[in-house]
Amino acid sequence: MTTSAPTVHASAVKVGERAVLIRGPSGSGKSRLAFDLILAGRAGQIPKAILVGDDRVHLATRGGEMWVSPAARLAGLIEIRGLGIRACDHVSEAPIGLIVDLMAEDAERLPTRHALRWRENGIELPRIPVGTGYEPLPLVVAALTTTESS
């Protein structure tokens, strides 16, 4: 993947075959959710999960999909609050399958279908808007392990 494009402030974890892209303002818990997903994968709650990138990632459109890769200088590093920057296994890229927006202003108890989708450059992906004060991990696990009812 070409990494000459600017980075975006986000983290990403590959869960199974697709990445969960985690966006949000500084201090919103992006690194925490990334590490929680890795732990959930190790515990068998979700498919195997491995870090793509923490804090800064590159996004690229390729083959009708959005791909994510780590910023080169941060590849394989994740911030663990209370421990600092730690090294961990990572992958060099993954197609994005889900976007999580932390501290999202449009988060609702029963979100509209429109709020649960992200669209850009002809690509549409599922999205989870997580409100301030809500724990994102259960929402992401539910999105990865359940299906929509009719």
Image (tube, rainbow, N blue to C red):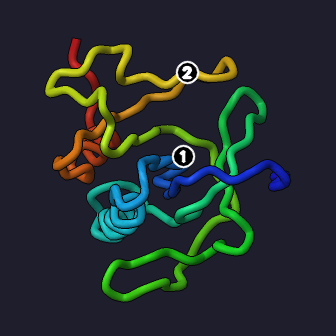
The residue drawn where x is 34% and y is 78% is: 81
Residue position marked by numbered label 1 in the rendering: 18
The dot on residue 119 is: 2
Q: Position of residue 93 (x, y in %)?
A: 68, 56
Label 2 – label 1 distance at C-alpha: 17 Å
| Residue 87 versus residue 124 in the image, above or below | below
Picture quarter containing residue 76?
A: bottom right
The residue drawn where x is 40% and y is 42% is: 100
Which amino acid type corresponds to the residue marked 2 in the rendered image? Answer: Arg
Q: Is residue 136 left or right of residue 88?
A: left
Which amino acid type corresponds to the residue marked 1 in the rendered image? Answer: Arg
The 10 Å Cα crowd at callout 1, few under 14, some 14 to 19, many 20 or more, is some
Q: Is residue 63 left or right of residue 71?
A: right
Q: Is residue 52 visible?
A: no
Which image quadrant: the C terminus? Answer: top left
| Residue 72 versus residue 122 in the image, above or below | below
Q: Position of residue 18 (x, y in %)?
A: 54, 46
